[in-house]
Structures are given as structure tokens and as C-alpha cells.
Image (cartoon, grey):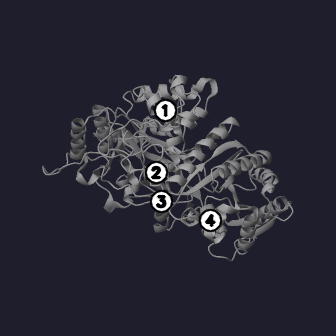
Amino acid sequence: MASIPVHAEATGAQVGQAVKKQPVSDAVSLPAPRFLPPDVEQDRFDEFAKRVLALVGQDNLEIISADTPLVNNDMGKTAYKYDAYRSADNECLLVGCGVVHPRHVPDVRAILALCNEFNVPLWPVSAGRNLAYGGSAPRVPGSLVMRLGTHMNRILEVDTEHYTCVVEPGVTYQDMHDYLAKHDLLDKVRQDTPEISWGSMIGNALDRGGGSTPYGDHWGAHCGMEVLLANGDLVRTGMGAMSSVEGREEAKKGVAPWDQTPNGCFSLFPYGFGPINDGLFTQGNVGVVTKMGFYLMPNFAGITPFMVTYPRDDDIEEAMRIAAKLRLNHIIQHACSMRYITLDAGFYGPRSDYTTSDRDQILTSDELDAMCARLNLGRWNFTGCVYGPPKMREMALEHVKAEMLRLPGSRFFTLEDRTERPSVLHARAPNMEGLCNMDQQRWIKQWMPNGAHLLFTPVSRVDGKTALQQFRLAKKLFAEHQMEFMGHLVVFHRDMHTVSCMVYDSTDAAMRDRAWKLGRRVVQEWQARGWGEMRQHIGLHDQVAASYDFNGHALLRFNETVKAALDPKGIIAPGKSGIWPRQYAKEKWLMGKEFIPAFPGVEPGLLGGGAGANGKVNGKNGDDGKNGDGAK
């Protein structure tokens, strides 16, 4: 078993250190925020900010003022303050009052206490990337964004016997990969990783992100959580709820709960005794997760990535039926992807390489065929792999070929067959092998200048007819909004995720607006057919939550009841997943009301208007100063 700090030189006080007031010069003057927290006046905010400053120090608190630049597509330090893609700007500018970087659990507890005292909403993030889903932007303008990952970034445990780990919020997939490489463990231990490896392991799992190996369900691969509740109480779930022998002795000596050695099965067995409460904290807003355990992956005895191409749009029906059968029978053991040609074309080059038409015009069928011929791809391109010793892989591939090459014109490729560089199959292969890779997302930046994107992922039955129906509907909706359809269909387990990618120029307000309106329309059309979104941009959370409407939105009413019990002042991430504290008048705060036929606690007559957000601002709101009430 091994345990070392990650980025130790960048980490502040270690977990468990007593909270000390930081020396603050009398000359320090904090600017007024662009947005004040709701119902908090300037003098009250000044007092709050000074208390936070005294707690964490000048380097760990930044006020987002009217003069703070909100740079389009900046993935650097400014990205921790807002949505770098500016996705919802045309409807509502989602920007906090500031960003705080706690150094350890005691800081988080103290910040929670201050937010309760001053009624300031708190928006916790881990690494704060969350591309296509809102980045670090808070749902309520004027919230204090709390970036846990700046200092709380230690790998606390890697168990190479049981293939588990325990990490803090700042540990990224790349960090874990580098740790395994540094300790010569990659021959034995691997991890699943999303397409971009810079994200937080905890943050991605809490938002139910996924990857490309048999461990690709990141939430499903978690085991054990440590959570701070709004009242400062620290809870460990599963087997973590039982103290270890060492932990009991540490408690007698006055060691703080967050520093006590966890139960030996904390990251081994997820259930413990009694109700399983972990789910309250995934896409939830009733606690702040400070540690999590995860299952790591044994290095397989071998891997053979492959690609199958299909020449016609309508091939998707039979191809997905075959892929679903192979996945369910575990011939293919991981979440596999059927990618449309435009998505892969973006990987190889910009849109201008394939057409001379304006970007608000849809590519013609002839242009798509020319694209396929040029890239030696099909209209649909399936990527997957088989795992195991050579003979096992050989037998599995024979079965895959026999099934997947039934369609006329279908073709099979291995890595050796794809000699071009870059290559989609070569870019996807490391992720399917449990290695980090940042190359897959080049289609976002290459397809057009200032490339940004929104992702829409309805969950449905995995069957060919549904796949074809979803594809045709998506193509139609995209064309109506002058957007090129890019996307892929994922066979997860027994379900299918049709990932529609809306790529736009983040500096083009008109195009950004078309993408946002398309997103609202897509959610609306999916709901009408019983297909529910499983993850979404924060500006669309109200609409998605409203689409889960069984029994008068019984689940949302339940979530609101839990919220009121565990966070009575409603300070943690108000509005996340459409869950609003009772202190908030929903009719004022809901976004996309014209797309929401009903919402618990809101009279029908109060719906049907425009965006909802009433953050009080100082100076200008939007970059042009025209967005003074928080919403257009």
C-alpha cells in the first residue's frame, strides 16, 4: 500500500491543521463584486468577505468585480470563476461574487459556518472544469464559488492488492496516472478516465461522468465518501461509518474526525448497514464531499482496439442492434461508441477543410460522402476493443467480425490498419486501455474558431429503432437551428446514451444563442418521447428537473424535502439539479420557464416567461453593461 501527497509544494496547511486567522494587512481593500449574493447588502457583504479573508488569507480569496475579465474560452485560472464557454450568457450571466480556495477540511467547515451566518450561497467545485455543463459557474449569481481542488489535492491511499484508492477533490485523472507511473504500477494497475484527463476524479464521479473501459461508470466505481453537511457535521458513508481500531484510539487523543484513519473496508465495500445515502451527494446540494474511495482497474492481459465503419445513415438501426447484443453478452466489455462522421471529421481538421459554405449552412449529403471518402471512414464509425489474453481476444474478435460485418459495405480496422496520424482510433485506444489522453477533444477546437460545445445525453432503451429515431430527430432539430449535427451513440449497459454535440463559436453571440435555444428544444422533444437527460448544463437544470414529472414531480418534491432538512438555510448550491431551497421564490429564479409546463411550488400562471435570476449587481453585469438585473 502506498500513500503520498500530490503537488505537495502547492498544498497549503495539511488536513486537520487547526484553523488560524491569516494575517491580513490593514491596507487590503476588497473590490465590490459584480454580483452581490441575493438579499445581501454591500456593507454586509464587506463584513462577510473580510471574515473569509481572515480565515484563508489574501492568496485564497478573489472577488469577482465588474472589472474582472470574463474571457471567452479561457481554460486557465479565470475558468474557475464562470463558464468559459459562455453558454447561457444570452439568457442569464451566471457569475459568482468571488472564489475561495480552502486549504483543508477545517477551512471548509469555517466557510460553511460563515455562509450560514451571512446567508451567502456557496457553490462547491472540485477542479472546476466541467466543460459543456457550466464549468465553475454558480446557478445563483452572487454565490461564493468554493474551489476545493486548489489545495485539497492529495492521494491519500492506493491499495495495489485490492485495487482501490482514496483521494481528495483536487486529484485529477492525470494526477492518478502520474502517481501510478511514478511508482512503476501501470503494469499492474490502471484507472478509467474520461476523454479529457484534467478533471477531478471526485468531481466527475459526482456529476456521473463516464469513460471507455469496463470501469467506465465513474459513480458506479466509487466506494465510500466523506462529506461535510451544511451544519459542519462530518459523515463517512458505507463502511466508513464504523471507526477503525486506529481511528478510535486517535479520537481518544483528540484527533479531528477528518484526520482519523478510516475503516479498512472504507474503499472496499460500499454499503455498510442501513440506508445507502451516497446518492444524495451525486448531482446534489446537501453536502460538500471532501474525500472519496474508488475502485481501480487491474491491468488486463491485453487489449485489441478496433473500428467498424458503416456507409449509410440508416445503417445505425441494425448496427446498434448488433452492438447492443455484443455488449449485453460481454463480448464487448465496455461502454462502446458509434460516432457520426462529422464528429470524427472534426478530429482530423476544421469544417473549412470539407466545405466552402458558411457555417450556418448544413453540410449536404454529397459533402458528407466526400468527407467519408477523404478520411476512409463511414457515415457511422464504431470504436471498441476486446480485452484478455491473446487467444481470448482472437476468439472475441472473430465473433465481433461475424456479427458487425453483416451490413453491406461495412469494414473492419485495427490500429495497424489505420496508418494516418492523427487517428481517431489511435486517440481512443489509450482511454480504452485505462491510460490518460488529452487528444480526443481536438474536434472541439478544430471544427471552428473559438470552438465551444454543449452536450445533450438522453437515456433510452438500447435498440436500433430508437437509435435511428433519435438520430433523425436530432438532425432535424439541429438543421432548424442552423447547427451541424455532431454526436455519437453510446451502448452503456442495457441502456443507450445518444450524445448530441452542439459546437459553436463562443465569441459569436448569435450562434451561441442558436445553440442554447437548440438545447432547450432538444430537452423538450426528448421529454415528449420519454427520453430523460442524465447530465446537463446548470442553466438547463430547471427544465431537465421538470421533465422528470412522474406523480406530480414526486422525486423533485422529495429532494426538496431532504434539502430543507439537511440544509435549512439553503446555502449549498441552491438550484443545482433544479432543487431549490424554500427561501427562494422559484418563479423569480427558474430559467427557461417558457419550456417548463409545470414545476412544484410554482403556480402555472407564473410560468411561461423568460429567464429567471434576480441577483443584485454592482456596476455592470454583462460585458456590455446591458444585463443589469442578472437576466435578459
385 versus 210 height, above or below: below
- Disc 1 is placed on an element classified as loop
Question: As shown in the figure, which amino acid type bears the numbered disc 3?
Answer: Trp
Measured as percent of width and height from the top left, residue 276 is found at 53, 33
Residue on which disc 1 sits: 579
Side of 166 relative to 523 (left or right): left
Residue at the farthest left position: 26
Check if mark 2's residue and mark 1's residue have beta carbons within 8 Å: no
Q: Are marks 1 and 3 in contact (CB under 8 Å)?
A: no
The mark that comes first in sequence, 3 or 4, is: 3
Marks 2, 3: nearer the viewer: 2
Q: Quadrant of the C terminus?
A: top left
As measured in the structure, the alpha-carbon distance from the residue carrying label 3 to the one carrying label 4 is: 21 Å
Image point (54%, 29%), residue name? 556
Distance, label 1 to label 3, CA atoms, is 28 Å
Say which of marks 3 and 4 sits in front. 4
Q: Is residue 205 above or below residue 195?
A: above
Q: Residues within 10 Å of mark 3 (few under 14, many from 20)?
A: some
Q: Residue at x 65, y 59 (%)?
A: 361
- The span from disc 2 to disc 1 (Cα, nearest Å) is 19 Å
Q: Which residue is mark 3?
A: 198
Q: Position of residue 81 (x, y in %)?
A: 38, 51
Q: Which residue is mark 4?
A: 346
The CA span between labels 2 and 3 is 13 Å
Horizontal side of residue 155 vs 442, given as left or right = left
Residue topped by disc 2: 135
Marked residue nearer the N-terminal end (2 or 4): 2
Q: Residues within 10 Å of mark 1 (few under 14, many from 20)?
A: many
What's the amino acid at mark 1?
Ile
* Residue placed most toward the observer, 216 or 72: 72
